[in-house]
Amino acid sequence: MGKQTLTTIAGRPDPAPPWWSERTCVVDLATIFLASLAGLVWLVGWLDNPQALTSNGVFKAMTVREWLKDYVKTPLDPSNFHYYPFVAFLCHLLDLAGVQTGDPRRQIALINCLFGAISLCIVYLLVRTVTARRDVAWAATAFHLGGAFFLNLSISNEDIIPSYTFLLGSLALAAVWFVNPTPGRIAIVAVVFALSWLFEWRLMFPTLPALLLALTLAPGPLWKRLLRVVIFLVAMVGTAEIAMQLWGPHNGNVGTVRDLLWTGKAVESGWAGFAMRKVVFLWVGVTEYLLGGANMGDASYLNVIRTEVLTATVLIAAIAVAWLVLVWRDAGSLSPRILAALFGVNFLAGEVFNFYSQPQDPQMQINVMIWLTVAWAAIVAAATLRFGPAIPRIALLLAVALLSYNIHRMAPARGADGLWRGALQRIEGQADPSRTVFLVHGFEQLVSETFYEWHGEWNYFAKLGPAPSSKPKIKLLAFVNGPIHRPSASGEEIAAELSQQIGHAMDLGYQVVADYVWELSEASFTSYMATVADASKASTIYRVLHAKFTGTPLFVDPVAGAFFRLQRAD
């Protein structure tokens, strides 16, 4: 049994009988799928806040809503090439079934529940195949469900879970098939992988190097190993080419497949670039994947979750070290090396990519932290061989405790949907949207709620006419817009542009109303801007705006907070 510390597939051309030939496996898959789907759907209703983790999904829901209105004319998005039409189709089916009719913001959360359940089935199949143990597979599946980011994203309206499911499927197939990589197997993995990044373009970058490296590990002369890589790339690019051709002249379709392979999404934005201030966000993103699930947008929030982050750091480090020891001890076997190449390189490349972009964002961490479940399963399997069958039961109990803790951490965000519906009515009564331009940070829930319910537009300002104006109903200016869209601009330049916009809105007869961000201290504002701007730039923006304008308290909403009417300081 020495070679089975990590896997039973080492040294065998095929790891196990097909899963469908084992009755217990089929029963387990059906149980996992139905139970997890029901549980996740229940959590959606219990939480009543599908954008609790991140508001990004609300803006995706607005695009889905456009697809539902006009499936023919709504343009494709090269960076989410298949996501919008696919999800719009599923939302249409939910409309036909009478489920959250006409509300893709909530429907997407339910669709994510479906793909979350499928992901758990993939985890079960992968672990059961590589360990040949049903109990370890159950423990690993429960652990994956209990992870904070996976759990939160599976019940939110963020857009990552469908593409994540395809990505997880490609990695699982590669983990089993790349021990004996036939051309057919390589092509299937490449197609499934291509589907993942056709839903979410950025998923290509961390995982492609891992897949190609794993392909070269199986025995064979150099030419044969290189041929495997060529087969994979041809199948992957060919899948993208076919997808592009099938859309034909549809609005927004790309000109060549190169435009799908490189879309350049967010490369020239404030999210892009390496910066020391991102180290803390990277640390928090890695640890909150396991415990808590906080999407930290304010650097000072680390003080609130410090104990949680430190605890997760110790746990993740311990799992990583134990897995590395197991891989080292079983280094003579092929399958442990393939597992390490697939999930280890995916993690390392992914965190470099995340450090360049948005390291704290749950959707940026979920696809690169898959290694944690694989490592946990390897440790449980090895411990079971050494200490007996009680180990998977203990691991299952620990997973339930993890799940319970992370559900508990969601509780403060419960019921926000209902609360915000009331808040929007109160805000409209206090500040007539047709005569008001709101100044906000840009990431607060006020933005996503008003944009969705009041049909907001980001590019409205250039065509803004005199007050009153009913379209768009919500008119926002955001502190983060300058740093995100003009990353090379100085703080003085960004502040001057924002000041000019505020003054122009006032000249057109609008009142400019700032939310609670206006009353933050300079230090708090700088911390709140840390994901998109360094401290010097953020401080400059703060000082210039507060020098040019004064804020008079207008009203305080119990949900949205304080609002201030701005006036020129002179």
Image: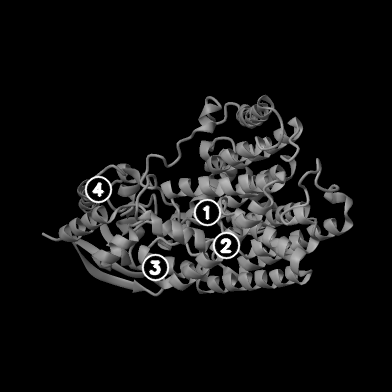
Q: Earlier in the sequence, mark 1 or mark 4?
A: 1
- Residue type highlighted by circle 3: Tyr
Task: Give the Cα distance between marks 3 and 4.
Answer: 26 Å
The answer to which of 241 and 314 lies nearer the viewer is 314
Residue identified by numbered label 4: 494
Task: Left or right? Give the position of 440 relative to 16.
Answer: left
Callout 1: helix, strand or loop?
A: helix
Would you call the spot at circle 1 few (<14 residues within 10 Å), some (14-19), or many (20 or more)?
many
- Residue type highlighted by circle 2: Asn
Q: Nearer the viewer, mark 2 or mark 3?
A: 3
Task: Give the Cα distance between marks 1 and 2.
Answer: 12 Å
Q: Earlier in the sequence, mark 2 or mark 3?
A: 2
Where is residue 213 drawn, in percent x and y?
61, 38
Residue identified by numbered label 3: 301
Residue identified by numbered label 2: 152
The answer to which of 515 and 225 lies nearer the viewer is 225
Q: Earlier in the sequence, mark 1 or mark 3?
A: 3
Q: Residue at x 54, y 32 (%)?
A: 260
Quadrant including the C terminus:
bottom left
Callout 2: helix, strand or loop?
A: helix
- Residue type highlighted by circle 1: Gln
Residue identified by numbered label 1: 365
Label annotation for residue 21: none
Q: Nearer the viewer, mark 2 or mark 4?
A: 2
- In the image as oriented, which residue stretches furthest toward the left? 570
Contact (Cβ within 8 Å) of mark 2 with mark 3: no
- Residue type highlighted by circle 4: Ile
Task: Give the Cα distance between marks 1 and 3.
Answer: 19 Å
Position of 430 relative to 4 (above/below): below
Where is residue 549 drawn, in percent x and y?
18, 60
Callout 4: helix, strand or loop?
A: helix
